[in-house]
Image (spheres, rainbow, N blue to C red):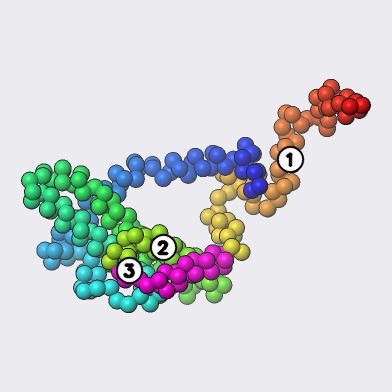
Amino acid sequence: TGGHGYLTAANLSNIYGNAVAAYTYEGENTVLLLQIGRALVKAWASFVEKKPLSASYSYFATSMQLKEFPKWDNSWQCIIKALQYTAAQKTRIAFENLANRMASGQSQGVAANNTGIELVRAAELHGRQFVCQTFLEQITGAKAQKRSAALNKVLENVLELFLVQTVLNNLNDILRFINLSDADLRSLQKRLEVSLEKFRPNAVAICDGFEFHDRVLNSVLGSYDGNVYPRLFDSAKRSTMNQKPVQKSFETYLKPLMKANL
């Protein structure tokens, strides 16, 4: 924005404040992640006992059937499977460590608290794989037939960007369980750069797709007609300091200084 974002008329401070508040409406994120972690542990216990699993945890079975993760092939499905495999392994480790702590004499509450870091990470990965899997199904599934080819192309690039960035952001856990070569990592980085390049021409239109009304944004920078600079100028003219073409301070201080023989 070239500094314009600091203007009150840009309203970015209020927009940011509202967005940040929405992130924690249901409580601090760690609390929610621990709740998901506990649900994962219960689901893993059911998996170990060979009880039926809900659809949300069905990837436990498919992932743990593998002795090791198959060769990386760079496909979207491969990325999803990698995230699911990693999430399942992290859940397994959290479950085992929780059980070991309880076996050593810790109460369930104390053991769960001491396993909190692992539960949070397992929950984060579980959420990532779910979002990625759902996103893939929505973009490439039956609904794709009802969209135009041009729109599908844009959405597929958004999917590519999201999947690749998710993998790169979680490499510390993925590399613990899956062998990726230097060439694989270079390929992922290149894919990220290419998808960002393709995303750039459509970025504004994609943001507009969220349909936040001008009235809601209340910003001179974010307006449907795109007339940013006329709106900036109109906003400046409405300032109490700009009610006259020339400020009194100019006549009092600047003009005499400019005419003085210094």
In magenta stretch: residue 196: yes
Q: Position of residue 239 (x, y in %)?
A: 72, 32
> The residue tagged with tag 1: helix, strand or loop?
helix
Instruction: Give the mark nearer the N terminus: 2 vs 1.
Output: 2
Position of residue 126 relative to residue 110, above or below, is: below
Q: Which amino acid, by three-letter code, is at mark 1?
A: Asp
Depth check, mark 2 against mark 1: the one in front is 2
Q: Look at 36% across and 66% down and name the residue there.
A: 133
Q: Label 1 near label 3: C-beta < 8 Å?
A: no
Within 10 Å of disc 2 (Cα), the crowding (few <14, some 14-19, many 20+) is some
The residue that mark 3 highlights is 82
Instruction: Give the mark nearer the N terminus: 3 vs 1.
Output: 3
Q: Position of residue 97 (x, y in %)?
A: 16, 54
How many numbered circles are shown?
A: 3
> The residue tagged with tag 2: helix, strand or loop?
helix
Which quarter of the rendering shows the C terminus? top right
The residue that mark 2 highlights is 168
Q: Position of residue 220 (x, y in %)?
A: 65, 44
The residue that mark 1 highlights is 234
Position of residue 143 relative to residue 223, above or below, is: below
Q: Position of residue 201 (x, y in %)?
A: 61, 64
- Distance from disc 2 to disc 1, alpha carbons, whole Å, reads 44 Å
